[in-house]
Image (cartoon, rainbow, N blue to C red):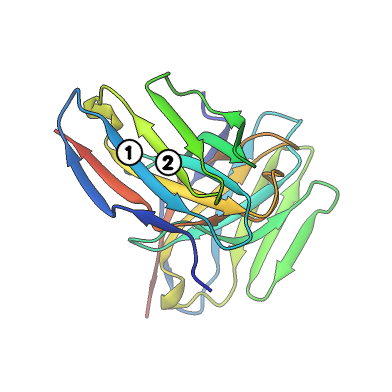
Amino acid sequence: QQQVKQSPQSLIVQKGGISIINCAYENTAFDYFPWYQQFPGKGPALLIAIRPDVSEKKEGRFTISFNKSAKQFSLHIMDSQPGDSATYFCAASMVGNQFYFGTGTSLTVIP
Amino acid sequence: DAGVTQSPTHLIKTRGQHVTLRCSPISGHKSVSWYQQVLGQGPQFIFQYYEKEERGRGNFPDRFSARQFPNYSSELNVNALLLGDSALYLCASSLTWALQETQYFGPGTRLLVL
């Protein structure tokens, strides 16, 4: 059973546009929600993370929006750049427990 | 500072064989976690080791085993390889056992089982 569901599978955005990736979870015990960025041939790298006590967290062009009641969270990439082209994974975990990753979104930003 | 290093980078094995993958964490990191990433999927947690003890295990068969050495490097062993074991195997290190702490991933070992 997929603990974290991620959509869309792939996304094409114009340079300067907004990229939005969505994730949903079922387990209300999850209390940590990170997003990872992975380039081809590299391991995932932590981009930004949020805990459920806040509804939004912003770091530069990257924002996580969190809706606890809907059990959904999303990544917004503002002013998307070609260098943002990568695969993005959401994940969820609870204290002392493993991470559950989504299936990934392949983002392509076209100039 | 060197990041997480893994060896080998690529490996080809046949069904039934055994494989050993190696990981060196970032200097000062005492926790190592192993993940399996099948093509087109997100990483799946296999093991976590902290201070040479297993702290967590994912839903993988007993053919998978791991250990951590006194220098905090780690090995992942897979016995009786199956075609379905073909994947990218990722190692991640962090300072402590708390998995919610930032984990730094290595580039992975790509295993192909024929």
Q: Chain of mark 1?
A: B
Image quarter where the C terminus of chain B lies is top left
Q: Residue furthest front?
A: B70
Q: Secondary structure at mark 1?
A: strand
* Type of amino acid under label 1: Thr
Task: Residue at 67% x, 76% y: name it.
Answer: A60
Residue B111 image point, x, y percent: 26, 42
Q: Residue furthest top?
A: B62
Q: Nearer the viewer, residue A18 or B36?
A: B36
Q: Residues within 10 Å of mark 1 (few under 14, many from 20)?
A: some
Residue drawn at point x = 49 percent, y = 70 percent: B2
Task: Please say if the residues under marks 1 and 2 sit with CB atoms less than 8 Å apart.
Answer: yes
In the image, residue A40 sits, relative to residue B108, either above or below, namely below
Quadrant of residue B89 within the rendered picture: top left
Is B76 left or right of B101, judged from the image as shown? left
Q: Residue sitting at 86 percent across and 48 percent down?
A: A53
**What percent of the width, then of the height, locates residue B28?**
63, 60
Residue A21, labelled with which disc?
Answer: none
In which chain is the residue bearing label 2? B
| Secondary element at image label 2 | strand
Q: Residues within 10 Å of mark 2 (few under 14, many from 20)?
A: many
Counting labels gives 2
* Residue B45 visible in the shown view: no
Left or right, residue B15 beside residue B41: left
Q: Is B42 on the left or on the right of A53, as rendered?
A: left
User: Which residue corresponds to mark 2?
Assistant: B75
**Is B6 left, or right, of A7 in this rendering?**
left
Q: Which residue is mark 1?
A: B20
